[in-house]
Image: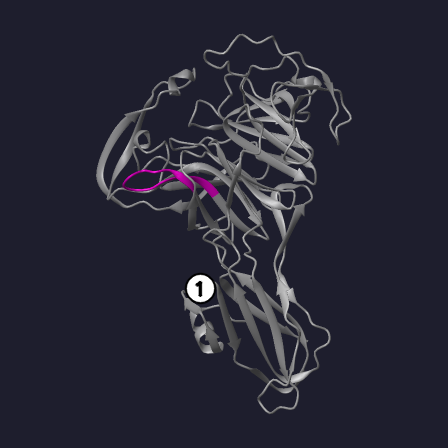
Amino acid sequence: MIESQTDWTDQIADSSGLDVSEGIAAPTDKTATLLSKTKTFDQKRSLKSLTVDQSPIWQNWNPIENVGPSNLGDAPVILSLGPNDYWMFGRYQSPKAKRNAKKAAPFEPKPAKLEGFDIPLQTTPFANQFDAPGGIDNKGGGYHAWQSKDMKNWVHHGMVTEQFSRWVTTAEFVDGKFYIYYDYPNDQDPHLYIDEDLTDGKPGKNMGMAFKDPSDGSDCNFIRDLDGNFHVVYEDWTPIDANKRSWDSPLAGHAVSKNGIDGFEILAPVVDNRTTPTGETKTYKHPHWLQHPDFKTNIAKYQVHTPEQEAYGDWASVAIGGRYYLFGDFDPVGGHSMSVGWFTSPTIDGPFEWCDNVGKGHPDPDVCFAEGRFYLITQQSTDYTSPGPWVDGVEVRVGVDTDNDGKSDTWSDWASIKESYDYTPGFAKQVQKTPASISPNDLPAGYGFQFEIKLTDTTDNKSKPMLDKVTVDFE
C-alpha cells in the first residue's frame, strides 16, 4: 500500500509532470506519469488486484440550469429513492404576471400522459410540469412534493407541510415512509412529519419536536447511517452573531437517534472552525422566533470571537462508499461573497475537513445521486452536476519479474480505470462505490511486481486526477 507522503517518495522510481505533497500525487500539467519501485518476494506470487483511490476533495462540479420545477420556491430539498424515483420539495409559487403585459386568458389544463406514470395528469403553465390528482387546486400551505422519473419532467402532488411548518430543512426515507423535518420557529428546534403517501396532497402525521437543540440555529440535515441510525448536523450559533453572517456559523453540532423521532444524543461537533473567544458575550435579534407561541424571546446570545470567522450552514449530506460529505452555505471572512462549500470525513462522527467551494450567492443546497450522477441543487439560478468524486484520466499497467533478475519482463496491457456508483436499496443518501481497480488474469506469477500510472487532466473545471492511495493485493 502506498498512502502517506513517505510511502510516495520512497516507492516512486521515476516520474514526470508529477507533484507529491501532503500524501497526494497530482499532475502539474495536463499529463503526468509515475513508475513504482519493484516489490520483491522470496518465492513466486500472483497478482490479485491493483486498486487506486483518489483524493476525496471532489472538485469536478459543472454548472447546469436548475433541474427542479421552475416554480419551486425557497430552499430545495431532494430525495433519491432509487432508479427513476426522485422527489423534490419546496414552496409552490404561482405564475407571475409580466409587467405591462396584456391580460392573458386563464390557463386551461388539459389531460396529459407521462412515461412512467399510470395516474391521470394535467398540464400546467410550467414547462415539463404536470399536476397529479393530489396537486390539482392545491397551491397553499408550506412545502409541496414533486416527483420525477428522469430529473427532467416533474409531477406535482401537492402539500406535505402546512403554512406554520413551512421552514422545511431536510428529509429522509425509511421503510416506505418519508421523514420531513422543519424548523419551528425558523432557525430553531427540528420538528417532524412522517408521511406514508406523498401523492394525496395532504401533510402526514405531525410528530412535533424531534430534537431539542440546546443552541440557537438549526437549518439542519438528517442522514441515516448504514445501521439505520439517524444523524442530525445542525448550525450552532453560540460563537457568532449569525444575524450578520447569513444566519450561519463556524460550528456544526451533531446528534444521533435510533429512530429519528426522539431520543437524540448530542455528540462532538463535526465542524469546528471557531477562532479565539474574547470572553465577551453579546446579543442580537431574530425576526421569526416570536411567531412560536411557546417562544418568549427573539434575543440570542453569542460569545464574541476574534479574528473574524468563516461561517457555514443550511447543511446537506451524502455518503459514498462509507465516506461522508457535508454541503452547505459558505460565508467566508472579508468580502462575504457566498457560495456552496463542502467538507468530508471517512465517518459521520468527523471531524470533517474542508474541501472546496463553487458558485455565487446564498445557495441553501441539497445533494443527491440520480440517473448515474450526482446533483447539487441550490436556491440560486444555477445547479451543479458531477460524475462523482472520481476524476477520469487514470491508466495503469503492472509489470512482473518472472526470472528474479530485479527487472519486469512481462507487462499487462494499459487499462483505464474509474470508480462507479450505484443506489443503496432502502437508503436515500447512502451511495455504493465500486473501487477503481484491475485484476489482470493473464499475468504470470513472479518474484517482483511494479506498476506504472498515466494521469491525464480531461476536465474543463479545476479538478484533476489526484492520487491518494494505491493498494496492490497478491494471492
Can residue 452 be found in the magenta stretch? no
213 left or right, relative to 400: left
Q: Which residue is mark 1?
A: 29
Residue 435, compared with residue 397, is above or below; it is above
Residue 314 visible (yes or no): yes
Amino acid type at mark 1: Asp
Residue 260 coordinates in the image, percent (x, y):
57, 35
Can residue 333 be found in the magenta stretch? yes
Q: Say which of 451 and 43 sits in front.
A: 451
Q: Say which of 52 and 270 sits in front.
A: 52
Quarter holding residue 334: top left
The total number of labels drawn is: 1
Q: Say which of 98 and 378 sits in front.
A: 98
342 left or right, relative to 432: left
Its colouring scheme is one colour
Q: Say which of 394 and 146 sits in front.
A: 394
Outermost residue, right side: 118
Residue 326 coordinates in the image, percent (x, y):
48, 44
Residue 414, compared with residue 69, is above or below; it is below
Residue 179 coordinates in the image, percent (x, y):
60, 31
256 left or right, relative to 218: right
Residue numbers of the magenta segment: 327-340
Residue 471 coordinates in the image, percent (x, y):
57, 69
Quarter placement of the C terminus: bottom right
Residue 236, compared with residue 403, is above or below; it is above
Q: At 46% across and 30% down in the image, what residue appears?
A: 212
